[in-house]
Image: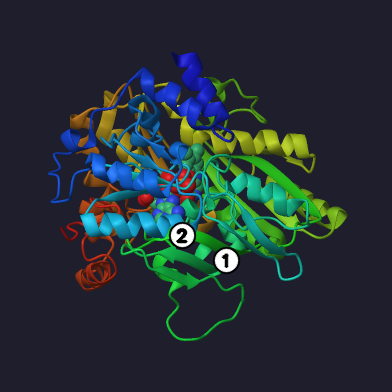
Amino acid sequence: MIKSVKSLVQLMGKSNILEQVRYASQALPQFSSEKYHIKRKNFGTIESADIGFFKSILSEEQVVTDESDILPYNIDWIKNCRGQSNLVLKPKNTEEVSKILKYCNSRRLAVCPQGGNTGLVGGSVPVFDEIVLSFALMNNIVSLDDLSGSLVCEAGCILETLDNYVRERGLIMPLDLGAKGTCHIGGNASTNAGGLRLLRYGNLHGSILGIEAVKADGTIVDCLRTLKKDNTGYHLKHLFIGSEGTLGLVTKVAIHCPVLPNAVNLGFFGVESFDNVLKLFKSAKSNLGEILSAFEMADFDAINSTVNSLNLPKPISDFPFYVLVETHGSDETHDNEKLMKFLSQEMETGLISDGTVTSEPSKMKSIWNIRESIAGSGLTVGYVFKYDVSIPQKNYYDLVPRLKTRMGDKALLIYGYGHVGDGNIHINVVVPEYNSEVASLLEPYIFEEVSKVNGSVSAEHGIGFRKPKYIHYSKDPSALQLMKDLKQLMDPNGILNPYKVLPDGPN
Ligand SMILES: Cc1cc2nc3c(=O)[nH]c(=O)nc-3n(C[C@H](O)[C@H](O)[C@H](O)COP(=O)(O)OP(=O)(O)OC[C@H]3O[C@@H](n4cnc5c(N)ncnc54)[C@H](O)[C@@H]3O)c2cc1C
């Protein structure tokens, strides 16, 4: 069993739904509704006439009713949440999405939008019998303007496919994450995904130029502009970026793609203390300035458990912390010299204890592979409680040692890694299997601690199903009320992704 779970994790960059079936069928998680004691809201239930309607507007293969085919759509990537949907719909275009929603709204049938199903907060899978609306068949690239860098595509395009496409035309996607081989651009937009290069290219509220979305009643909202500047009234695209499918379904995205850098360099450094990691970050900002594209850190347990469990080569020997610094620039010689100078200077100051710098694509890929595999490696050992929080950089790592003391031998491993550059730490707590006693030691403790330092309970993964009851730690009641008002306005029957994001949505 471990062997195939391992291969799933290694394949994460390229995995498809088939691997997920294999994975999911090995040990089915408990139904989310039972595990978290959720009561079904007052939605309609699917009847044969409903299936008949969907078959009248979609082709046979777009209406999935077979239980085993539906299984992977009911289980999230981390195998924590499991829904009970009996129906998956796979529209091929915006008009079909519109017809489906119009009908569902009239019948008060709840809908769970799903992209690549790599979300880590249970937002992408149903809780009860919501219809899964999968974007997998909406994967056309509409246009690319290589002068302005604006790409227009359908929501179901896989991030890595888009990146390969624009790279061949001298551009890159402005975001990169470990799940790139599976996640969809529509899912990225709906979660406001961050990732490895946010430090350089900013978040999706900046990169996304326009959005086409469908409201709960089937209305198509066309905000699909490709302009960098458009100050014509309310900036409506932002409503759909990061709202996790609760305000509307994203059907097309226009996104700005930066120019493919001529020179990419990568450094992997061993560091003795977290204090030194922070000093190194400060130094990288001033010494690498305009070419710095990523500054990532991982502690010993994060790297060690990943390379061991997945049999990956380790670039340098053991250190308490590791830092990965990437540069994107226009001059190979200049950039390489700059990074080499940074390495030798900081080895002299003692901030870096050992390190390696490379611009060789295969070596860079192998180092990035270690960093990108951390998120999934714990799954080869057991169940992983995953936290994704924003913390002011001076307090960034404090929670990890505190959690180790608090959990004692109740956890197999506790490690921290993440995007130091933007204050986002991921904390993983690995246990043999899900355990409610462990859960109650971790939550709400972690969120209370984050709140004490004015952090955020979700830095990039979103609120989804797992965090609505903790959203108040990071959102003022006045802001929460406005969120509820918006939901009421845009989805009065509450059919879009119920039980997610809002602590107590309509219906
Ligand atoms: C190995 C790994 C590494 C990851 N690294 C990162 C990282 O660095 N940064 C980061 O931010 N996240 C990361 N994630 C989390 C995840 O990949 C992102 O949240 C991603 O954006 C989700 O995209 P998806 O297509 O898989 O969406 P899904 O998981 O299918 O859905 C996510 C949410 O968006 C909604 N949704 C999906 N598509 C649409 C749509 N078209 N319209 C409306 N709503 C929709 C769903 O209902 C759900 O609420 C990682 C996950 C894994 C497994």
Q: Nearer the viewer, mark 1 or mark 2?
A: 2
* Mark closest to the chain's N terminus, 1 or 2: 2
Residue carrying label 1: 207
Residue at x 21% of width, y 70% of height: 481
Depicted 385 relative to depicted 503: above or below: above
Which class describes the residues within 10 Å of circle 2: few (<14), some (14-19), or many (20+)?
some
Does residue 4 appear to the left or right of 141 in the view shown? left
Where, quadrant-wise, is the C terminus in this rendering? Answer: bottom left
Which class describes the residues within 10 Å of circle 1: few (<14), some (14-19), or many (20+)?
many
Q: x%, y% of residue 113? A: 38, 49
* Marks 1/2: CA–CA distance: 26 Å
Q: x%, y% of residue 486? A: 27, 71
Residue at x 57% of width, y 66% of height: 207
Residue carrying label 2: 95
Does residue 319 appear to the left or right of 5 in the view shown? right
Q: Amino acid at mark 2?
A: Glu
Specify how the rendered protein is coloured: rainbow
